[in-house]
């Protein structure tokens, strides 16, 4: 389980057994509040998925166009 500081967006590993407990404070800015559970897919990975989906659509429409033209 990872946590993200809402102040400086530093990614922190959870503490305790299995890392299920939130860190006591941010190691970068020292904030004791605002440490939130990291949720879902990181934005960079979401962007990558969007690019892959766009490329797949482009390839698909390209093959349809060439089929119609040919
Ligand atoms: Zn911080």
Image (cartoon, grey):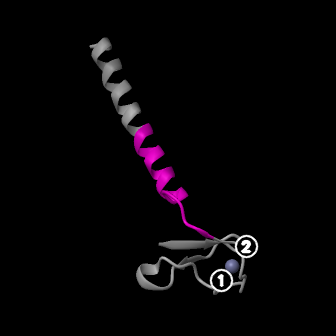
Q: Residue at x 34, y 28 (%)?
A: 60
Quarter of the picture holding the C terminus: top left
Task: Kindly tell me whether mark 1's CB lies below 8 Å from ligand 1.
Answer: yes
- Mark 2 is surrounded, within 10 Å at the Cα level, by few (under 14), some (14 to 19) or many (20 or more) other residues, namely some
> Which stretch is magenta?
36-54
Q: Residue at x 50, y 84 (%)?
A: 15
The image quadrant where one finds ligand 1 is bottom right
Label 1 to label 2, Cα distance in Å?
9 Å
Q: Secondary structure at mark 2?
A: loop
Taking the image as shown, residue 36 lies to the left or right of residue 61, namely right
Instruction: Name the residue nearer the viewer: 66 or 41.
Output: 41
Residue 53: say if magenta: yes
* Residue position for label 2: 7
Which is more toward the observer, 9 or 53? 9
Question: Quick one: 30 or 14, which is closer to the camera?
Answer: 14
Q: Is residue 29 above or below residue 53?
A: below
Instruction: Considering the whole magenta stretch, tell me its main secondary structure.
Output: helix
What is the number of the mark on residue 40?
none
Horizontally, residue 14 falls left or right of residue 62, namely right
* Percent coordinates x, y for residue 28 in the rendering: 66, 85
The answer to whether the residue bearing label 2 lies less than 8 angstroms from the nearest atom of ligand 1 is yes
Q: Position of residue 39 (x, y in %)?
A: 53, 60
Dot 1 and dot 2 residues touching (CB under 8 Å): yes
Q: Is residue 52 above or below residue 42?
A: above
Which structural element holds mark 1? loop
Q: Position of residue 9 (x, y in %)?
A: 65, 71
Q: Which residue is mark 1?
A: 26
Does residue 5 sit above or below 53 in this rendering? Answer: below
């Amino acid at each position: 389980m990872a946590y993200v500081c809402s102040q400086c967006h530093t990614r922190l590993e959870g503490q305790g057994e299995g890392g299920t407990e939130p860190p006591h404070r941010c190691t970068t800015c020292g904030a004791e509040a605002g440490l939130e559970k990291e949720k879902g897919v990181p934005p960079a990975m979401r962007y990558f998925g969007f690019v892959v989906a766009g490329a797949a659509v482009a390839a698909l429409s390209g093959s349809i166009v060439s089929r119609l033209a040919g």
